[in-house]
Image (cartoon, rainbow, N blue to C red):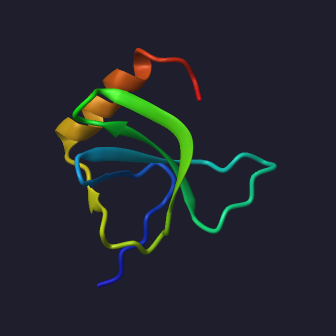
């Protein structure tokens, strides 16, 4: 079974919750851009983090993890 991540997906790996975001118009990347929340600190890292669209080492985030990401994101500035 092939996994293909896409914009808007929430992923989880090694204690971090990732949200796939759109590329900027002038930014060309060999993968998908994401921002991530480090669960242990509650801090969102906004520097683009690249994820391969077929990287099976990331699992889909749970509903609780997505809610945690969204509530943390609302408390911080826009990208």
Position of residue 44 in the picture relative to residue 31 (left or right): left
- Measured from the top left, where is residue 79 in percent x and y? 59, 29
Q: Which residue is farthest right?
A: 26
Residue occupying image coordinates x 36% and y 74%: 3
Q: Which residue is farthest front?
A: 41
Residue occupying image coordinates x 46% and y 17%: 76
Residue occupying image coordinates x 49% and y 69%: 52
- Measured from the top left, where is residue 57 in percent x and y? 30, 69
The relative height of residue 16 versus residue 78 in the rendered view (above or below) is below
Position of residue 52 in the picture relative to residue 16 (left or right): right
Q: Which residue is farthest top?
A: 75
- Measured from the top left, where is residue 13 in percent x and y? 27, 55
Name the quadrant of the N terminus. Answer: bottom left
**Viewer-proximal residue among 11 and 41:** 41
- Measured from the top left, where is residue 73 in percent x and y? 41, 25
Residue occupying image coordinates x 33% and y 32%: 69
Position of residue 66 in the picture relative to residue 21 (left or right): left
The relative height of residue 48 versus residue 67 in the rendered view (above or below) is below
The relative height of residue 70 versus residue 16 in the rendered view (above or below) is above
């Amino acid at each position: 079974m092939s996994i293909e991540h896409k914009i808007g997906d929430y992923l989880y790996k090694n204690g971090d919750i990732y949200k796939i975001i759109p590329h900027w118009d002038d930014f060309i990347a060999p993968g998908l851009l994401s921002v991530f929340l480090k669960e242990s600190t509650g801090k969102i890292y906004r520097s683009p983090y690249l994820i391969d669209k077929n990287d099976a080492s990331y699992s889909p985030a749970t509903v609780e993890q997505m809610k945690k990401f969204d509530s943390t994101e609302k408390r911080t500035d826009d990208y």
